[in-house]
Image (cartoon, rainbow, N blue to C red):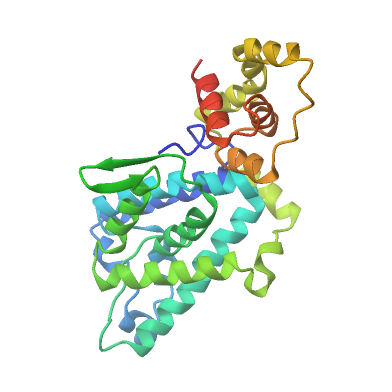
């Protein structure tokens, strides 16, 4: 499933989380401590090992979980491109801290049923499924034998695999993440209006390590505006020759936002929607074709 331009262009927060998660998982895995990273009742309420609160957020306990988790985190970079890195950082913070509180309460009240939780950024991943469900449109449908699927089905299947990877130990963090995602979606406590101070955001931006793929993608994205008219010049000339046709209406904000959420810049998205008379699917295909040329 296409999540917009490849790489971490315009997604520095996602890039940091993905790299940190991979490094923490590898580091603790090499040392043989991956199975000891999850939150446990004894560690939190009896031994007071508060460092587990941090280690349980970033490191997965197994390679399959790491692969599925990183793939989902990488795909969900589309939301950072949509709302901006500052607000996405607020979303990440909210989606980590609120579920962490729920998980501690679950360990306290369900200690006879649940003594340990699996580590990893489950809460952030499953909080991201809420905007994925509401904001990412279905652009294509297909059928395998008698099963009807869509272009979003693969993401859901990967999420289900991760959610049940460790039974109840992974189910609880996942459900806590979905709950936090719903809180953010419905603007509980006015969280969607919150932003980090510009000074703090600037410091984080300078700390984010550079990426050659990002710089290449940046120049590629900047060139989309130039390549798109060239690639579609014939169609635009035809439209200009139709003098009897009245001026086309402006594309809807919803269609424009959808294309921008896929990683395309505003100018290219606007031109594609104008050329396709507001047809979202046709505009998406034109942008993807222009990008491949």
Q: Position of residue 69 (x, y in %)?
A: 36, 52
Q: Position of residue 281 (x, y in %)?
A: 53, 34
Kindly identify the residue that appears in the image at 65 percent across and 39 percent down: 256
Residue 16 vs residue 206, the one in the foreground: 16
Q: Quadrant of the N terminus?
A: top left
Q: Quadrant of residue 62?
A: bottom left
Q: Compared to 270, does 109 lie above or below? A: below
How many numbered marks have been drawn onto this rendered protein structure? Answer: 0
Indicate left or right for 12 with 45 as reference. Answer: right
Q: Residue furthest left?
A: 145
**Residue 252 appears in the figure:** yes
Residue 204 vs residue 159, the one in the foreground: 159
Q: Compared to 215, does 2 lie above or below? A: below
**Residue 30 appears in the figure:** no
Q: Compared to 1, does 147 lie above or below? A: below
Indicate left or right for 37 with 181 as reference. Answer: left
Kindly identify the residue that appears in the image at 28 percent across and 72 percent down: 169
Q: Compared to 234, does 251 lie above or below? A: below
Q: Quadrant of residue 29?
A: bottom left
Q: Position of residue 289 (x, y in %)?
A: 50, 21
Residue 262 vs residue 26, the one in the foreground: 262
Kindly identify the residue that appears in the image at 55 percent across and 24 percent down: 286
Indicate left or right for 28 with 205 as reference. Answer: left
Q: Position of residue 107 (x, y in %)?
A: 35, 83
């Amino acid at each position: 499933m296409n999540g917009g331009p490849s790489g971490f262009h315009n997604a520095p927060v996602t890039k940091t989380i993905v790299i940190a998660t991979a490094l923490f998982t590898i580091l603790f895995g090499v040392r043989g401590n991956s199975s000891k990273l999850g939150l446990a009742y004894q560690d939190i309420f009896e031994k007071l090992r508060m460092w587990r609160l941090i280690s349980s957020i970033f490191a997965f306990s197994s390679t399959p979980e790491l692969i599925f988790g990183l793939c989902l985190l990488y795909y969900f970079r589309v939301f950072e491109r949509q709302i901006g890195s500052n607000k996405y950082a607020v979303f990440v913070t909210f989606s980590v801290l609120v579920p962490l509180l729920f998980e501690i309460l679950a360990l306290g009240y369900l200690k006879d049923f649940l003594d340990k939780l699996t580590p990893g950024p489950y809460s952030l991943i499953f909080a991201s499924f809420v905007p994925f469900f509401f904001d990412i449109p279905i652009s294509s449908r297909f059928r395998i034998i008698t099963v009807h699927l869509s272009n979003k089905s693969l993401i859901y299947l990967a999420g289900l695999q991760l959610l049940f990877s460790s039974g109840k130990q992974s189910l609880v963090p996942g459900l806590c993440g979905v709950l936090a995602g719903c809180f953010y979606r419905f603007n509980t406590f006015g969280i969607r209006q919150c932003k980090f101070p510009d000074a703090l955001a600037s410091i984080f931006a300078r700390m984010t390590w550079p990426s050659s793929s990002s710089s290449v993608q940046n120049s590629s994205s900047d060139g989309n505006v130039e390549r798109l008219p060239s690639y579609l010049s014939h169609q635009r000339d035809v439209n200009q020759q139709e003098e009897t046709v009245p001026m086309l209406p402006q594309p809807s904000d919803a269609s424009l936002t959808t294309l921008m959420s896929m990683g395309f810049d505003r100018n290219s998205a606007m031109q594609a929607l104008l050329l396709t008379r507001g047809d979202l699917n046709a505009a998406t295909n034109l942008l993807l074709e222009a990008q491949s040329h």
